[in-house]
Image: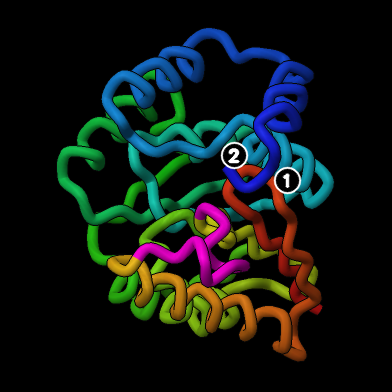
């Protein structure tokens, strides 16, 4: 947590609870230690997505498909989502969840290492959601910039990484490389002439980057 516990608890208590498949996936994730976006991040993703009204979304980091299913709620009619993941167990489970949600024709899952997959994609997107390996964000960035439409949004999760990004005293030795790379990523998106970026202490840290 990067905010006071009482603030997180209060914010989460204001959020209407999900039901159906999303609720089931939240329970599964908690019981099986699968990382999914935190409730306040999920709400921010929904609000920004509905304002943007994207036709095409790219997600980097599928896991069990929770956030892709969530993002399907903000698509313009006929819109599409492409999501990338490398872990076979997650891929199979996510595909099954997309089928259960009736979204097989809306969400396409691309199997492979995101660093390599992004280089091969030749499409344009209105919204890109980064939620994969934190140490690889700097490698994702050039491809995200190439594929993001003007007026589009790059939404990057976990950018404050348990507070380590902002405070050297919190950095765990084995995480030093990730911290260094994430700081480089944040410097890049904040200094990039193509982007207007805001870093928010929501969840584990979120960066919203608007492409001019």
The image position of residue 112, as x and y in percent, is: 23, 61
Whether residue 112 sits left or right of residue 125 in the image: it is left
**Pointer 1 or 2: first along the chain:** 1
Q: Nearer the viewer, residue 66 or 52?
A: 66
| Badge 2 density bin: few <14, some 14–19, many ≥20, Cα 10 Å | many
Q: Residue furthest front?
A: 169
Which residue is depicted at the point 52% across and 66% down?
A: 169
Whether residue 90 sits left or right of residue 146 in the image: it is left
Please report the bounds of the magenta region as a residue range.
162-172
| Badge 1 density bin: few <14, some 14–19, many ≥20, Cα 10 Å | many
In the rendered image, which residue does mark 2 sit on?
Answer: 71
- 30 over 84 or under it: above or below: above
The image position of residue 117, as x and y in percent, is: 32, 70
Which residue is depicted at the point 52% across and 78% down?
A: 141
Q: Residue 43, can we see it?
A: yes
Which residue is depicted at the point 38% across and 23% down?
A: 30
Task: Determine if the magenta segment contains residue 167.
Answer: yes
The image position of residue 12, as x and y in percent, is: 69, 23
Q: Find out whether the residues at labels 1 and 2 contact each other: C-beta distance under 8 Å.
A: yes
In the rendered image, which residue does mark 1 sit on?
Answer: 49
Helix, strand or loop at mark 1: helix
């Amino acid at each position: 947590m990067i905010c006071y516990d009482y603030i997180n608890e209060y914010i989460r208590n204001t959020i209407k609870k999900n039901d159906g498949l999303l609720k089931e996936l939240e329970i599964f994730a908690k019981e099986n230690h699968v990382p999914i976006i935190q409730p306040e991040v999920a709400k921010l993703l929904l609000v920004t997505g509905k304002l943007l009204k994207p036709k095409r979304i790219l997600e980097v980091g599928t896991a069990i498909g929770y956030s892709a299913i969530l993002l399907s709620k903000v698509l313009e009619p006929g819109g599409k989502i492409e999501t990338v993941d490398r872990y076979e167990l997650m891929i199979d489970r996510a595909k099954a969840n997309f089928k259960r949600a009736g979204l097989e024709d809306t969400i396409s899952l691309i199997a492979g290492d995101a660093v390599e997959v992004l280089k091969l994609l030749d499409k344009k997107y209105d919204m890109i959601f980064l939620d994969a390996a934190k140490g690889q964000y700097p490698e994702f960035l050039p491809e995200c910039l190439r594929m993001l439409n003007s007026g589009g949004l790059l939404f990057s999760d976990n950018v404050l990484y348990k507070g380590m990004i902002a405070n050297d005293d919190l950095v765990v030795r084995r995480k030093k490389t990730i911290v260094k790379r994430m700081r480089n990523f944040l410097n890049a998106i904040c200094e990039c002439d193509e982007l207007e970026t805001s870093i928010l202490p929501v969840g584990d840290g979120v960066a919203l980057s608007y492409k001019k």
